[in-house]
């Protein structure tokens, strides 16, 4: 691009300039601006498609080992893509406005020098503006698609958060039930211990009575043996 601009400038310095010679410089600039937009938009579309695949094919409800991993990072990536698309749309619209302004200028020039002299330039700038407007429509459609993908991602994240909260609540409830059962079992065992203790206490009283009786009759028994 730099070498072509240098050649044009040297050519303009070496010969007498015609009324349309400066249009060659505009043409080179237009061709430079038109280049690589399609590839850059394809790049952004590829980034969006990666998140699209997760949003459209992620399972909800029962989990699967091979399921997509959807995290808040995906929402952040979508926001980065959205900002790049907005910036691209703004630049494309601005360049298209420049193309329309040049088209009006060339039309005025054609009225002064004749339409045949500017026909090729008009066609070039018409094509330039049409290409930019086409790229702008593609970017706008990608922005609409991104909006839907973003909603899906947030719905998936919210649904999975609710699932996790429900599972946690269920686990806590189950643990509470188990603790309640353990408490009831401990209370039952405590009651059994109280009953056993009372029984042992009664047995102790009986042993004392028997011992007392044995002490009373033992001397008489010894005397009878004597």
Image (cartoon, rainbow, N blue to C red):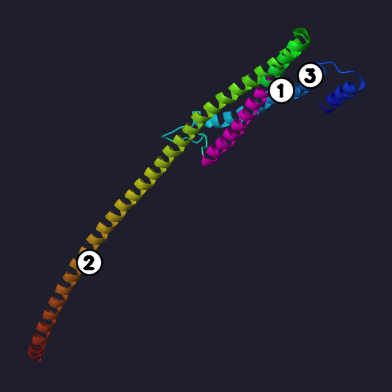
Instruction: Measuring from the top left, give residue 213's x and y in whole percent.
Output: 9, 83
Q: Which residue is mark 2?
A: 193
Q: Is residue 180 left or right of residue 92?
A: left
Which label belongs to residue 23? 3
Q: Is residue 176 left or right of residue 80?
A: left
Instruction: Measuring from the top left, give residue 138's x and y in whole percent.
Output: 59, 22
Mark 2 → mark 1, Cα distance in angstroms: 92 Å
Region in magenta:
71-99
Image quarter for residue 130?
top right
Asked if the residue under mark 3 is in contact with the one under mark 2, i.e. CB atoms within 8 Å, the reply is no
The mark closer to the camera, 1 or 3, is 3
Residue at the far front in the pictured view = 112
Label 1: which secondary element = helix
Identify the residue shown where x is 72% and y is 25%.
33
Is tag 1's residue or tag 3's residue first in the polypeptide sequence?
3
Quadrant position of the N terminus in the picture = top right
Q: Is residue 115 left or right of residue 3?
A: left
Identify the residue shown where x is 59% and y is 25%.
139
Q: Residues within 10 Å of mark 3 (few under 14, many from 20)?
A: some
Q: Residues within 10 Å of mark 1 (few under 14, many from 20)?
A: some
- Is the residue 94 above or below the residue 221 in the image? above
Q: Which residue is mark 1?
A: 34
The mark closer to the camera, 2 or 1, is 1
Instruction: Measuring from the top left, give residue 112's x and y in whole percent.
Output: 76, 12
Residue 10 on the magenta span: no
């Amino acid at each position: 691009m730099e070498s072509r601009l240098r050649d044009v400038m040297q050519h303009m310095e070496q010969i007498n300039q015609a009324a349309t010679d400066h249009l060659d410089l505009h043409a080179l600039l237009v061709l430079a601006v038109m280049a690589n937009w399609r590839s850059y938009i394809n790049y952004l579309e590829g980034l969006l498609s990666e998140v699209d695949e997760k949003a459209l094919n992620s399972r909800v409800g029962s989990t699967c080992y091979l399921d997509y991993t959807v995290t808040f990072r995906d929402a952040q990536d979508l926001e980065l893509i959205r900002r790049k698309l907005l910036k691209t749309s703004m630049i494309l619209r601005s360049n298209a406005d420049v193309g329309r302004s040049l088209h009006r200028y060339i039309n005025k020039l054609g009225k002064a020098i004749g339409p045949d002299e500017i026909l090729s330039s008009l066609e070039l700038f018409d094509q330039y503006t049409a290409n930019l407007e086409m790229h702008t429509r593609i970017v706008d459609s990608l922005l609409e698609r991104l909006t839907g993908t973003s909603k899906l991602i947030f719905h998936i994240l919210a649904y999975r958060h609710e699932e996790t909260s429900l599972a946690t609540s269920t686990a806590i409830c189950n643990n509470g039930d188990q603790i309640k059962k353990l408490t009831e079992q401990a209370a039952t065992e405590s009651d059994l211990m109280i009953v056993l203790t009372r029984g042992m206490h009664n047995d102790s009283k009986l042993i004392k009575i028997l011992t007392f009786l044995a002490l009373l009759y033992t001397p008489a028994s010894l005397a009878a043996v004597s």
